[in-house]
Image: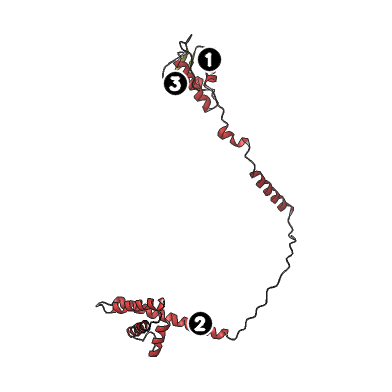
Amino acid sequence: MDLLLQLIAKKKVSINDVPIMEIIEQYLDYVRQMQDDNLEVSSEFLEMAARLLYIKTVSLLPVHEEAEKLVEELRGELTEYQDCKMVAGKLQNQAKGFEFYARPPEEIEVDMTYTRIHEPFEIFKAYLAAVGKGKRRLPPPIEAFRGIVAHKIVSVSSRIGFIIDKFKSKKKHRFISFFEESESRSEMVATFLALLAMAKAKRIQIDGDGDNTEITLLEGGEESIEIDE
């Protein structure tokens, strides 16, 4: 950008009036001369040269609307860069009259005494929070697991005893009556398995369907009741 502004300044015209194509040609000649003199050309110069060369190439096409757009973008960037350099120069001139002073660091004594005053309620809340954190480190109480793992385990053999006791009052009962007093799902499942085991051992007879199903106790089963707990 600085080199382009220098080339424009030699024309003694504004950026909007300078023939950009002529400036592009001068810039490319300058970069080629640096390469011929074996001077190290920075990447910024080569990047700008590639950009200007592209603008020049596009301008040679029959329809060069893109070239005109690129030229206007370049004029805008040059104008902004020139304004920034002018403002930076003014700021630099204004700063010349200022002198800066600095003093060496000093050690500062720090009083570590806690001077804040707390209300009793704040102290009580802090105590409760500290106690709560301490409790969180303890294992959960047994009551916390009762709803998860503390279900009552009901054996099939105990439900067989329950069924036999029920038949002491009468020899025939509705199927649903064996489940009416169940306190848990485990108890219902164990009762159902007990009825199946007794039916397999021919100790009971199941008649009917749905709500009308009835269970009758048979006298003297032919097989022993096998229980798969």
Residue identifier under label 1? 164
Q: State which tag comes first along the sequence, 2 or 3.
A: 2
Name the residue type under label 2. Answer: Ala
**Residue at horizontal 52%, vertical 27%?**
186
Viewer-side residue, 25 vs 142: 25
**Residue at horizontal 51%, vertical 24%?**
188
**Residue at horizontal 56%, vertical 85%?**
94
- Tag 1 secondary structure: helix
**89, above or below 206, in the image:** below
Residue 225: x and y in percent read: 48, 15
Name the residue type under label 1. Answer: Ile
- Give the image's coloring scheme: secondary structure
Q: Dividing the picture into quarters, in which one does residue 116 lie?
A: bottom right
Instruction: Give the spatial CA distance, label 2 vs label 3.
Output: 98 Å
- Tag 2 secondary structure: helix
Circle 1 Cα neighbour tier, 10 Å, few/some/many (<14 / 14–19 / ≥20) = some
Residue identifier under label 2? 88
Name the residue type under label 3. Answer: Asp
Viewer-side residue, 212 vs 218: 218
- Eye-nearest disc, 3 or 1: 1
Residue identifier under label 3? 211
User: In the visual, does 33 lie left or right of 191?
Assistant: left
**Residue at the left extreme of this rendering:** 62
